Image (cartoon, helix red, strand yellow):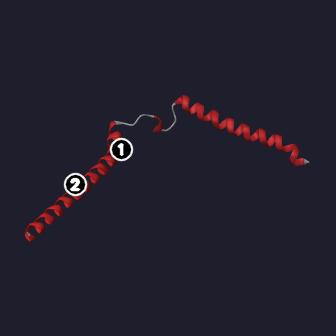
């Protein structure tokens, strides 16, 4: 019986804490005290964020060129072997 009487008070206290947290966040937002992740990145950060995709692109481009070179080399070797048989 005691716990059923305190449950509404406990729920009110928890709700008050949540509301207090949200109020503090809103005040921090209004004072502009939130971290920098809200702001747009600088040019240097944007350039650095492009760098991994450029490395990945150049790596796959190099792998494709190597595969193409290997196919052309195998075709040339097959052509040379075929000419020697004739």
Q: Is residue 52 above or below residue 76?
A: above
- Furthest toward the front, the residue is 86
Q: State the SS at label 2.
A: helix
Residue at image position (90%, 48%) is: 2
Residue at image position (64%, 38%) is: 21
- Furthest toward the bottom, the residue is 85
Q: Which mark is residue 13?
A: none
From the viewer's perspective, tell me whether residue 75 is left or right of residue 16. left
Q: Earlier in the sequence, mark 2 or mark 1?
A: 1
Q: State the SS at label 1.
A: helix
Residue at image position (20%, 61%) is: 70
Whole-Å distance between the Cαs marked 2 and 1? 26 Å
Q: Quadrant of the C terminus?
A: bottom left
From the viewer's perspective, tell me whether residue 51 is left or right of residue 72. right
Horizontal and vertical percent position of residue 26: 59, 31
For the residues bearing labels 2 and 1, Cβ distance under 8 angstroms: no
Horizontal and vertical percent position of residue 20: 67, 36
> Few, some or many C-alpha atoms within 10 Å of disc 2 (few <14, some 14-19, many ≥20)?
few
Q: Nearer the viewer, residue 50 or 17?
A: 50
Q: Nearer the viewer, residue 24 or 74?
A: 74
Q: Is residue 30 above or below residue 62?
A: above
> Few, some or many C-alpha atoms within 10 Å of disc 1 (few <14, some 14-19, many ≥20)?
few
- From the viewer's perspective, is the residue at label 2 or at label 1 nearer? 2
Horizontal and vertical percent position of residue 14: 73, 41
Q: Nearer the viewer, residue 23 or 53?
A: 53
For disc 2, the marked residue is: 65
From the viewer's perspective, tell me whether residue 61 is left or right of residue 31. left
Residue at image position (26%, 56%) is: 63
Q: Is residue 36 above or below residue 83?
A: above
For disc 1, the marked residue is: 49
């Amino acid at each position: 019986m005691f716990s059923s009487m305190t449950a509404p008070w406990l729920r009110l206290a928890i709700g008050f804490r949540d509301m207090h947290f949200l109020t503090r966040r809103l005040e921090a937002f209004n004072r502009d005290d939130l971290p920098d992740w809200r702001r747009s990145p600088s040019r240097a950060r944007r350039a650095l964020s492009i760098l991994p995709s450029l490395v990945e692109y150049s790596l796959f481009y190099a792998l494709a060129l190597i595969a193409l070179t290997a196919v052309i080399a195998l075709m040339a070797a097959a052509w040379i072997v075929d000419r020697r048989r004739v």
